[in-house]
Structures are given as C-alpha cells and as structure tokens.
Image (tube, rainbow, N blue to C red):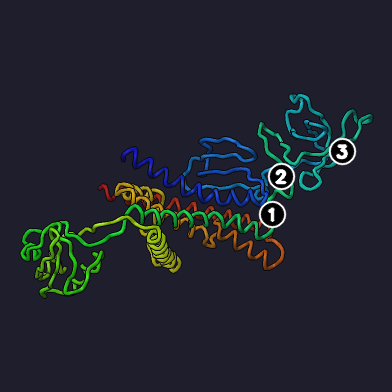
Amino acid sequence: MSPQIIFQIVLLFFVLVTIHEWGHYYFAKRAGILVREFAIGFGPKLFSFKRGETRYTLRLLPVGGFVRMAGEDPEIVHVQQGQTVAVRLQDNVVTHLYLDQLDQRSEVVIGTVDKIDLEKDLQIRLFTGPEEEGTTETLRVHPQAMMVTRGKETQIAPWDRQFGSKTVGQRALSIFAGPFMNFILAFVLFVTVMFLAGMPTNVKIERVEPNSPAMKAGLMPGDIIKTVNNTAVGASTTKLTGMIGQSPDQSMNWIVLRGGKETNISVTPAKNDEGRILVGIGLSADKRNTSFGEAFSGGWDNMKLATQQILLGFKKLLFGQFTLDDLGGPVMMVEVTKQHASAGLAQYTFWAAVLSLYLGIFNLLPIPALDGSRLVFLGFEAVRGRPVDPNRESLVHFIGFAALMLLMIAVTYNDIVRLIRGEG
C-alpha cells in the first residue's frame, strides 16, 4: 500500500470523526457546558494538549471518538467533611484545592473541611490551626478552580456548567449536532463530486471488440452516438445498453457523429456465450463543467439515493436478512477505502460522502451508547417532566457500548479470516 493511499485512509477517518465530535463540542460550548475532553479514538493516549478548558487527545484505537462533558460522568473526587486539604488563594478566592501531598505544597492554607459546596454556593469552610485554638473561615471558590490529586488537575464544574443543568432542548441539540455535521459534510462532498466528475454531454464509443457486430457494422472508436431508432441517446449509457438488450438479432438504425458529420449505420445485436445481448463496444462520455445548480441538485439526488440504500441495509439487519460476511469492520473499511482511493479523487470523495452519511444515520439509531439512544432518554425526560435515573441510563449505555465492541471484534476477526482466504 503506497504512502499516499495510507494518508488518504487516515485522513478520511480523521475528518469524519472530527467533524462529528466538533458538532457535539461546538453546541455544548454554546450552551455553556464545560467540555473536559475532545478525543479522536479510544484507549490509551498517543498525543494530548490542553487549550483553554478543554484537553484535546488522539487515542490509540481508531474506532470513533468522544466529547466528555462535565456532569456526564462522576470524574471528580468528592471532598468529605472532616477531610484535611490544602487550598491556594488569590485575592482571598480559592483557585486550587489539593487533596494529597499536603506537606509538599507551598503558599497554601491547610485545614479541615467543615463544609464544602463546589456546585452551587461555591464555598468551602475550613477549620485551621490547633484543635483548641484554631479558627473557622469561609472561603469563596473560583468557578474555574482546579482540584489536584495524584498529580492530576481537574477543573471543578459548577452546576450551571454541567450537562444536566441545561434544558432538554440544549442537551438534545448538543447530541444531535454530531450526526447533523456528518449530514452537512456528506452533502458538501456529494456536491463536490458533481464538480469533480463533470456533466456528461453525449455517449462516445471508446473501443470496438474484434469480430463483433459493431465492427461488422462499421462502428469506430471516437464515434459519438446521437440517436438509435430515432430515439436520442443523450448522455445516458444506461439508456443505450437498455435499448441494445431489448433488440436481440434485430437491426437497429444508429446515427453517429464522426469527424463532424452524421453517419447512418445499421447494427444488429447478438447474444454472446453467456447469453448477454451485446454489440461489442466500450462506452465513455464526453463531459463539460458542472454548474452550481446542477451540482446542488445532483448532489442532493445522490444523497437521497445513498440514504435509501443505507436504510435498506439497516432494514435487512433489523429483520435478520444477513450473514456475518455481509458485515464489515475496520479492516474491511480500510480495504474498501483503499480501492476507492486508488480509483481517483472523484471516487474517493464519493466514498467519503457515503461514509459520512452512514456515520450520521448509524449514530441516530436508538442503540444504547449511540447518540440516538441518548436522544430517546431525553425524549422520555421531556414527556415525564423529570430525567431518567442517571445510574440506570449509564448502565444501559455501558452495556450497549460493550455489545458494540464485541460485535466490532467479531466482524474484525471475520474480515481478517476473509482476507486470508482471499490470499490463499
């Protein structure tokens, strides 16, 4: 596999996942939610940096990505009453809260927690000094204060910065935005394909097979086919092959443009050894530049057609009309992407559009751990007027994620077996 093909495969995965997660990230930030991490991939970190409040990471397993929002997981260690902590102050406001290695902290106040609220009141009441002579002091906590333990800093998340504090509409939008960005990208790519491929203007004979009906009739490479039996062929090769298939052993009157002049030729299709009705020609199409209107409408038509095919595939999956060989995992995706990338820029872009569309639709399925399932839970909350128990929802998503990972392992194993059989 050439370095260029490898780059195109990696680029495709990176763009599709990044645009999806960016949709979640952007609308979460607009809603005022603290986004702790923007990750591409799962598993161990390969590369990481922090900008502002968010840590951006590239992880080992290229099977997706995630945006970790404050309040979705209990990622902060809770401070208990009676616990000894150290705080760093700036203008009498707590900016850092240390939970361990207190004797190694400099320029801090050490005390015992009497009361603490890091979500609503943003206050901590500390008892400092000897047990009998100490004093109690209430300190205000900065809304972006850092909690430090085991060498790791975690920004606190006041209630108004947490996912659960936002309205159902704001949360639903931050979840739906991921698939929606994939739909936007797919449409842009389908339109781009129309510009790259151009608009066919007529059907042209690319080659003539030896001893074929076409050669016997006098057809030549370069002939532009205008009409067949007084019917304009236009730019549709499908239309022409359909007319040929309906005329076995029947003389057809073709008008072709050769050297700027129209020529009448009589052609009689015949069956080959496989029973197919042919005249023995290879076809191509002359093309012109695509207008914006044509690109827009053509891109939309291709997107609708691809959507129908994807939904048909999901229907077969739902009703069990498939085998394991009909499914493909990361290995098969790489193989198919390699084929499309090798076929040229237009074909590669078309495949990227289909994958982006597929990713958007797949994530909206009501399968636990996917965006569609999270939207279903928000729908329940909107109807009931109260949220589903977060622990139960988390358990459902965990089970769904584990099931998806097991399915991924199964189809990946099947992909590898299939490749080995193909090599053998």
Give the mark nearest the N terminus, 2 or 1: 2
The residue under label 3 is which amino acid type? Thr
Q: Of the two numbered discs 3 and 1 on the same chain, state the one appearing first in sequence.
A: 3
Instruction: From the top left corner, tell me how far across and down residue 75 is, in percent.
Output: 66, 44
Residue 47, horizontal then vertical, whole percent: 52, 35
Quick one: which residue is furthest to the right in this view? 133
Kind of element beneath mark 2: loop
- Front-most of 285 and 361? 285
Please name whichever residue, 182 or 163, is drawn nearer the observer in this view of the structure.
182
- Residue 138, labelled with which disc? 3
Which is nearer the N-term, disc 3 or disc 2? 3
The Cα–Cα distance between marks 2 and 1, rounded to whole angstroms, is 11 Å
Residue 261 in sight in this render: yes
Nearest the eye: 8 or 331: 8
Do callouts 3 and 1 mark residues in contact (Cβ within 8 Å)?
Answer: no
Task: Classify 10 Å Cα crowding around label 3: few (below 14), some (14-19), many (20 and above).
Answer: few
Residue 86 makes an appearance in the image: no
Q: Is residue 103 left or right of residue 47?
A: right
Give me the residue at 38% from left, 40% from top. Answer: 7
Q: Which residue is mark 2?
A: 157
Q: Residue at x 38, y 59 (%)?
A: 295
Q: Quadrant of residue 141?
A: top right
Q: Residue at x 12, y 70 (%)?
A: 269
Q: Residues within 10 Å of mark 2 (few under 14, many from 20)?
A: many
Q: Position of residue 358 (x, y in %)?
A: 44, 58
Task: Work out how far the residue at label 3 is from the one at label 1, CA to CA, in angstroms.
Answer: 28 Å
Q: In the rendered image, which residue does mark 1 sit on?
A: 164
Please tell me whether residue 340 is drawn above or below residue 126 in the rendered image: below
What quarter of the picture does the N terminus occupy? top left
Residue sitting at 51 percent across and 39 percent down?
A: 58
Q: Amino acid at mark 1?
A: Gly
